[in-house]
Amino acid sequence: MFKKNEHDDLIVTHFADDYNTYLGAVVPPVFMNSLHVFDTIEDYYDTPKFVKDKYVYGRVSNPTVSIVEQKVAALERGAMALCFGSGMAAMTSAIMAVCKSGDHIICIRNIYGPTKLFLTDYVAPRLNMTVTFVGGQDICEVEEAICSNTALIILESPTSLVFNVIDIKAVTDLAKKHGIRTCIDNTYCTPVFQKPIDMGVDLVMHTASKYLGGHSDIIAGVLVSSDKELMKKIAMQEREWFGGILGPMEAWLMMRGIRTLPLRVKAHFESALKVAEYLEKHSRVRKVNYPALKSHPDYDIMEKQQDGCAGLLSFEVDADVDAAKKVSNGLNLFKTGVSWGGFESLTFMPFLKFDDQEIEWLGSAQNLIRIHIGLEGTDNLIEDLEQSLSKL
Ligand SMILES: *Cc1c(COP(=O)(O)O)cnc(C)c1O
């Protein structure tokens, strides 16, 4: 852990900014145009799609979007990236790109909720596919779930409510053996802390609404792969036809967020680790879910495949649901809200409306409190947690 990645620092600061093209501007402009025009009809028809510096229409590509795509592709060590209007637009496009009617999908149980609902309530009943959910940590369970028509395995690691870690390389080795594609939601770690393509993953998905944007001011998503042909297909089919490309202003804000990504995630990590250690020692806290804690059951695999951990964690208080609600509501610096990855600290109780059976299936508890450790200062945040927990 804590490896300093100079290369990432160079990508976020200067890669693809192309001063020569943009009149020496240290920050490339927002190309707020829907269209690029040509002198003649021959010029128009001779312009190939997805060739560097060739643009035709804004639903297909845009220069500002392209700069941020080049940065993310380089950070993830992929061949090509594509930005979308949200993380869900990216994830649903990935699934539609790889799978067809009649296929089988394996997905981890603790995947982001709307991704799971897309699979169970849309892909399965409407598109005639089947889905098997697995814990993901026992590789034999994953292997047993494989069918002759399995086309895709969907992963997220660490997961964003209970923070279990999947052995990514073990899953991709298995998938390759069976000719199955893999896709991972890498939002939690960001490319700074985890490089899934190096571990054999075919498609990496991010919502940039979290750390990549980093300032809680955009909704955006991105897909990356080392398979350029697959990415070109997604660009010309799923993205161009469903029309989910990211807008230029959001792309520019995403680029601005990415400039400080390595600095920010390191700050979130350092602070979150101290908060997790504080919570772990607290007499009224039963359990802390944060993979960078030595006591976490997945610590060893986390250390093997991640260079750090993010600012999101969860904990169970040693009290009932009503008392847990009081702890969450009693926080002052942590505001109640979904999402995470911005500068601000947040608290949320994700399982209040879940039934007991489903919570057990996810391996958690109804009184779970998830917090995002923002940039308000570690001591201030610990003090806030202390005053609220002390009322238990
Ligand atoms: C927020 C989130 C998403 C969805 O991203 P949007 O940009 O809101 O569509 C996907 N995965 C994870 C882990 C998330 O936290």
Image (spheres, rainbow, N blue to C red):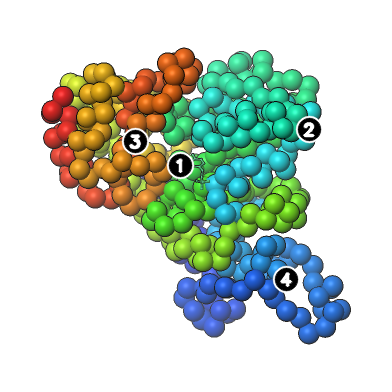
- Helix or strand or loop: what does disc 1 sit on? loop
Question: Residue 131: percent from the left, percent from the top?
Answer: 66, 25
| Residue nearer the viewer, 335 or 39 | 335
Tell us which disc is closer to us: 4 or 3: 3
Question: Residue 214: percent from the left, percent from the top?
Answer: 41, 53
Whether 294 is drawn above or below 192: the answer is above
Whether 212 is drawn above or below 37: the answer is above
* Type of amino acid at the residue the image marks with label 4: Val
Circles 4 and 3, Cβ within 8 Å, touching? The answer is no
Q: Which residue is found at the position 39% from the left and 53% from the top?
A: 216
Quadrant in which residue 180 is drawn: top right
Circles 4 and 1, Cβ within 8 Å, touching? The answer is no
Q: Which residue is found at the position 61% from the left and 74% from the top?
A: 33
Using the image, tell me which numbered label, if any, was put on residue 56. 4
Packing grade of label 3 (10 A; few <14, some 14-19, many >=20) is: many
Which of the marked residues, 2 or 1, is nearer the chain's N terminus? 2
Name the side, left or right, on which 290 lies relative to 187.
left
Packing grade of label 2 (10 A; few <14, some 14-19, many >=20) is: few
Name the side, left or right, on which 10 lies relative to 49.
left
Q: Which residue is found at the position 78% from the left and 32% from the top?
A: 101
Tell us which disc is closer to us: 4 or 2: 2
Whether 174 is drawn above or below 23: the answer is above
- Helix or strand or loop: what does disc 2 sit on? loop
Q: Which residue is mark 2?
A: 101
- Label 2 to label 1: alpha-carbon separation: 32 Å
Circles 4 and 2, Cβ within 8 Å, touching? The answer is no
Q: Which residue is mark 1?
A: 189
